[in-house]
């Protein structure tokens, strides 16, 4: 009963922060929703209950208390036909006081800036725009994960720092995520993440300011066997408060819900097959362990934009 009360309190806090932050800027937090970890991308962008993920600081820092090894992973991804580059360096380390980290870079290179030969005239046949230089748009985000127990409930806290450099403007910001998980038995695990429980504030060099909406993610993992093959099923709900209507699965007012599903088939102790559903796109991938090295590949089919590919190499040790 003590556990149940604490979980209810966490959910109440989540709803409280949602209700008090509906006025934050729409889409200001999109750069924090890119996900991390190739296996998690292949699993439909689930990960709140995945202690196998090297990107544990991004997903759920409370899992540091049950992760049984140190690890790191280098990931490279190309989105939108290679226009957007997404790289992360993730890991966790420590025996007693463990810490997790994820450092990500989101980059769009060689963006063309144009001018008119005569700024006083409208564009036309005799006044065509010309490219006068190219710029790079880059975001850097650092997540640091820490975990402690509140009674029997593992809690995680993840401060995050962001630096943005878009064309000729730069910005910096800071926020905090709160996470928790419980595992009543070997078959079920539940995870909770309150994104931006301290809302991330982004300050631009030109004096403008953005605030990121608070959001909540919940996830259930079911572990079972099909014949003799271990199988893990991940069911995730992403709750946003940005009045997303056309591109959301379900919405009520400013609050929307998007589903994420993942299935991991452990074909062999060294080989896993992944598949999933990421809002409206299907994902798949494979993970291979060779000695202490980790190799992962993920693919997402996207009919509206373009397909995405992610690769990673990692290492783990006890």
Image: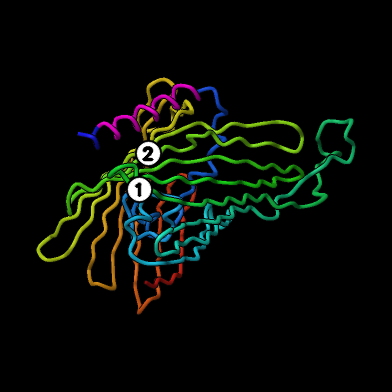
Residue corresponding to mark 2:
217
User: What residue is shown at x 41% (from left), y 67% (from top)?
Assistant: 70
Per the rendered image, the range of residues in magenta is 5-21
Farthest left residue in view: 227
In the image, residue 179 sits, relative to residue 83, either above or below, namely above
Secondary structure character of the magenta stretch overall: helix
Farthest top residue in view: 253
* Count of numbered circles in the view: 2
User: What residue is shown at x 40% (from left), y 61% (from top)?
Assistant: 96
In the picture, the quarter occupied by the N terminus is: top left
User: What residue is shown at x 35% (from left), y 33% (from top)?
Assistant: 10
Q: Is residue 158 left or right of residue 274?
A: right
In the image, residue 271 sits, relative to residue 31, either above or below, namely below
Badge 1 marks a residue whose secondary structure is loop
Badge 2 marks a residue whose secondary structure is strand
Residue corresponding to mark 1:
48
């Amino acid at each position: 009963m003590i556990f149940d009360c604490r979980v209810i309190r966490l959910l109440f806090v989540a709803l409280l922060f949602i209700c008090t932050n509906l006025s934050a800027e729409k889409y200001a937090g999109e750069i924090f929703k890119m996900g991390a970890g190739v296996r998690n991308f292949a699993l439909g962008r689930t990960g709140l209950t995945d202690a196998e993920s090297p990107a544990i600081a991004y997903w759920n820092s409370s899992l540091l208390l049950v992760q049984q090894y140190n690890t790191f992973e280098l990931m490279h991804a190309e989105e939108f036909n290679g226009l957007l580059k997404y790289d992360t360096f993730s890991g966790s380390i420590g025996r007693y006081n463990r810490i997790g980290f994820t450092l990500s870079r989101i980059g769009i290179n060689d963006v063309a800036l144009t001018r008119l030969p005569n700024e006083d005239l409208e564009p036309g046949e005799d006044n065509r725009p010309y490219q006068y230089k190219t710029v790079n748009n880059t975001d850097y985000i650092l997540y640091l994960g820490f975990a402690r127990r509140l009674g029997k409930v593992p809690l995680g806290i993840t401060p995050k720092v962001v630096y943005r450099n878009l064309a000729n403007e730069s910005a910096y910001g800071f926020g905090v995520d709160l996470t928790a998980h419980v595992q009543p038995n070997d078959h079920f695990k539940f995870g909770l993440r309150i994104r931006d429980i301290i809302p991330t504030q982004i300050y631009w060099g030109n004096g403008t300011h953005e605030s990121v909406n608070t959001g909540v993610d919940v996830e259930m993992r079911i572990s079972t066997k099909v014949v003799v093959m271990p199988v893990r099923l991940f069911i995730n709900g992403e709750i946003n408060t940005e009045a997303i209507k056309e591109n959301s699965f379900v919405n009520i007012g400013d609050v929307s819900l998007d589903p994420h599903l993942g299935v991991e088939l452990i074909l062999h102790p060294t080989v896993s097959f992944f598949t999933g559903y990421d809002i409206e796109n299907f994902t798949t991938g494979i993970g291979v362990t060779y000695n202490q090295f980790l190799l992962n590949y993920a693919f997402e089919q996207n009919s509206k934009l373009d397909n995405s590919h992610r690769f990673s190499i990692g290492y783990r040790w006890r």
